[in-house]
């Protein structure tokens, strides 16, 4: 028979994880779907489970010293209404699921689920998200691109838990997030795209591009981004062909029930062009996000 654990404190959760290695359930919006059975039957969990959504200690958003700290139990809905959360992350969250799901689903759950189509992931990649992993013995911090290993696969032991997520609190000049789904809400992504740029004296100083649902994990290539530094802002539109050529070989989507590979690839290349065009026109006029 499977056991359910309901720790009262974070410390107690770590002790249970160390001793009994149960699987973690937070909002349950992924797990309850994965474990669903015939109508009328409760979900079929085959291993011991530890429920963590009652741990208020992990429900916080803090902004300190150029970083934003998000506790593992923060729900998507809470992110949407917090003044310290960057607008680009809010835009991604607003495109996800429905209010009912967002009130229970967590950011940590979206990361740990490690779906190539996870909507917060491209944004977290460009915000240089770090995952804080807790266990009874130690606390570890790992970059999101090292934490997510492949579809449904993460670098986390059974005795460990995601404690918090840390993101950069960067003031970009222009940011863009786009999701292509079958409809405006409650749709899984066909592709998702996040990008941001900063400049000084009309020269690009920082450019970040991340693409979701076109490869086993989010595509973000820092060497390409470095090549784009020092581009004059008014030449950004002109380099779009070159930038698309850089990314083309890495965009290897699959065809499935939601979309074809060709359509996904076309969307991403169009988003790269749109981002560079819009950024080139808007930088220097107002700091903004493309809503
Ligand atoms: C109707 C519906 C619509 C949806 N729409 C979208 C959408 O548009 N875009 C999208 O990206 N997703 C969508 N989802 C998926 C889901 O809501 C998100 O992935 C959500 O963020 C998962 O969070 P959760 O807390 O519910 O995770 P859970 O289901 O509780 O857990 C998911 C995984 O994360 C692990 N986990 C959770 N918390 C921790 C932790 N602190 N430490 C370690 N491991 C942990 C669990 O063990 C499990 O493997 C949708 C789901 C539903 C049911």
Image: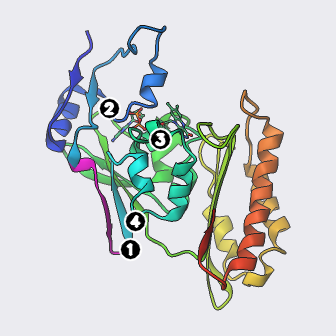
Q: From this viewpoint, is residue 130 visible?
A: yes
The residue that appears at 45% across and 58% down in the rendered structure is: 129
First-in-chain label (4 vs 2):
2
Q: Secondary structure at mark 2?
A: strand
Quadrant including the C terminus? bottom right
The image position of residue 257, as x and y in percent, is: 72, 27
Q: Which residue is mark 1?
A: 66
How crowded pointer 2 is (Cα within 10 Å; few <14, some 14-19, many 20+) is rated as many
Name of the residue lying farthest toward the bottom: 201
- In the rendered structure, does residue 58 fall within the stretch colored magenta? yes
**In this rendering, is residue 226 above or below 234?**
above
Give the answer, above or below, for where 286 lies relative to 247: below
Query: Which of 124 and 175 lies nearest the eye of the viewer?
Result: 175
Residue under numbered circle 3:
99
- Which quadrant would residue 288 be assigned to in this image? bottom right
- Give the Cα distance between marks 4 and 2: 29 Å
Name the residue beneath numbered marker 4: 83
Contact between marks 3 and 2 (CB within 8 A): the answer is no
Spatial CA distance of label 2 from label 1 is 30 Å
Where is the N terminus found, in terms of image quarters?
top left
Q: Is residue 209 visible?
A: no
- Mark 1 or 3 closer to N-term? 1
| Label 2 beta carbon within 8 A of ligand 1 | yes
Number of the front mark, 1 or 4:
4
Question: Magenta part of the protein: which range?
Answer: 57-66
Which residue is labeled 2 in the image? 24
- Disc 3 vs disc 4: which is toward the camera? 3
Near mark 4 (Cα within 10 A), the count class, few <14, some 14-19 or many ≥20, is few
Asked whether the residues under the numbered discs 1 and 4 touch, taking CB atoms below 8 Å apart as contact, a structural biologist would say: no
Residue 61 percent coordinates (x, y): 32, 59
């Amino acid at each position: 028979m499977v056991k359910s654990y309901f720790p009262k404190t974070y410390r107690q959760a770590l002790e249970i994880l160390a001793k009994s290695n149960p699987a973690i359930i937070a909002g349950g919006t992924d797990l309850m779907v994965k474990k669903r059975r015939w109508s009328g039957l409760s979900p079929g969990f085959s291993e011991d489970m530890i429920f963590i959504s009652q741990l208020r200690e992990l429900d916080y958003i803090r902004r300190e010293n150029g970083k934003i700290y998000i506790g593992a139990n923060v729900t998507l809905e809470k992110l949407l209404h917090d003044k310290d959360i960057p607008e680009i992350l809010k835009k991604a969250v607003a495109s996800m699921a429905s209010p009912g799901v967002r009130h229970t689903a967590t950011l940590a759950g979206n990361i740990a689920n490690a779906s190539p189509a996870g909507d917060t992931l491209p944004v977290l990649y460009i915000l240089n998200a770090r995952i804080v992993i807790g266990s009874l013995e130690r606390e570890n911090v790992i970059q999101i691109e090292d934490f997510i290993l492949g579809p449904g696969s993460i670098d986390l032991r059974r005795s460990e838990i995601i404690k918090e997520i840390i993101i950069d609190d960067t003031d970009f000049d222009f940011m863009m997030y786009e999701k292509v789904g079958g409809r405006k809400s409650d749709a899984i992504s066909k592709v998702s795209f996040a990008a941001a740029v900063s400049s000084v004296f009309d020269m690009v100083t920082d450019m970040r591009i991340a693409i979701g649902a076109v490869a086993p994990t989010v595509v973000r290539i820092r060497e390409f981004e470095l090549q784009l530094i020092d581009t004059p802002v008014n030449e950004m539109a002109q380099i779009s062909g070159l930038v698309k050529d850089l990314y083309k070989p890495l965009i290897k989507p699959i065809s499935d029930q939601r979309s074809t590979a060709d359509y996904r690839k076309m969307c991403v290349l169009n988003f790269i062009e749109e981002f560079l065009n819009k950024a080139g026109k808007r930088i220097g006029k107002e700091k903004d996000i493309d809503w």
